[in-house]
Amino acid sequence: MIRNTLPNDLKEYYNDIDNVSWDTDKVVCLEKKKGFLGLYTRYLYLLPDAYEVLGKKQDIFIYHYTQKKKRPTIICAPILGGKMKKKDGKWKGSFPIATINAWIFSVFKRWNALVVCTDNKAMFTDGDTPENFELALKNVAYNNIQAIQFIKTLDETDHDKIYALGVSLGALTMCCMAGIEDTIKASVLILGGGPLSIVISQSTEGSVRKFFERFKKSHNLTDEQATLALNEHLKTNTTRLGKYIPDGTSMMILSECDTSVVTDSQKKLLEVVKPREYFLNKLPKYFQWLSIFSSKASNGHYLTAALYPFLIFKTMLFLHKVRREK
């Protein structure tokens, strides 16, 4: 399952993916409901976490949109998301972009889709050391890999047609995961960047900015020192793992004037991944005057949302071509 192309040090670092054991019989189905016009059925599963991180395990929740027949499966990664919470006897979470993407592919492509409901914000709150941050990153990738391991046990999953779609932090997660593990046959990375030390140190995104400032203060470091410390310890890093994504299996979407995942870091990841296709959104350059209202209004990260229907269409075309070639 670990990519044979990984160097030995990374194979050893990730070898617990293949060696850990967990009982699929302990998976619990929490919810089953018919989707839009009965075009799919959505299940909510709870998976017991197989990987202990920082002395704890946290249950993994996944939404599985299924056609009840063997079809391609696309894993749609949340951006930041939040914790799943039980209210009035029902489990709920906020993963809007990922669930919209899963819905689109389920309704319009009639594919199976998967949303792994991880609390990615926890990476920026659970630890202020580079070592702990790396463990949190590794755990997010492992949660997604464990979810795919479970989905592969279901009859409707075509093992040769499992794809990934990630936006922002979800793109970072899918990039690392596709580099580590060989299940992902194609990936679409929207607004991902690297190396992560640069993404974190230069991002204007609230939770990321707070983490970096807190990290500097707690270790009495300058910006440059803190960036170097993160870069030294982050193994689950997009620019380190992205190079092992097989040639011709990825598409990237970038944006000018992005301050959440800075544009230069997006272009750096582009050089490493060498995707089969890419699209650079240049429109934000012409809307920088919006900064007089707010910094977010001129941020290419958010302005890219205006093109989202077009970008999803491009994503579908790319994955359609990949699928037909297999």
Image: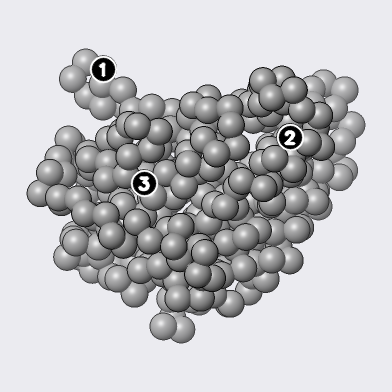
Q: How is the image coloured?
A: one colour
Q: Is residue 291 left or right of residue 230?
A: right
Distance from Cα at disc 2 to Cα at disc 1: 40 Å
Say which residue appears at 16% left-offset and 44% top-offset.
27
Q: Which residue is mark 2?
A: 226
Mark number, residue 25: none
Task: Estimate the x, y position of residue 122 in percent, counting from the top left.
Answer: 48, 29
Q: Which residue is mark 1?
A: 87
Quadrant of the snapshot with the C terminus:
bottom left
Q: Is residue 210 above or below residue 141?
A: above
Distance from Cα at disc 1 to Cα at disc 3: 24 Å
Mark whose residue sits in front, 2 or 3: 2
Please report whichever mark, 2 or 3, sits nearer to the chain's N-terminal start: 3
Classify mark 2: helix, strand or loop.
helix
User: What is the three-letter code of the residue carrying label 3?
Assistant: Asn
Residue placed most toward the observer, 156 or 216: 216
Q: Which residue is mark 3?
A: 143
Say which residue appears at 26% left-offset and 27% top-offset.
91
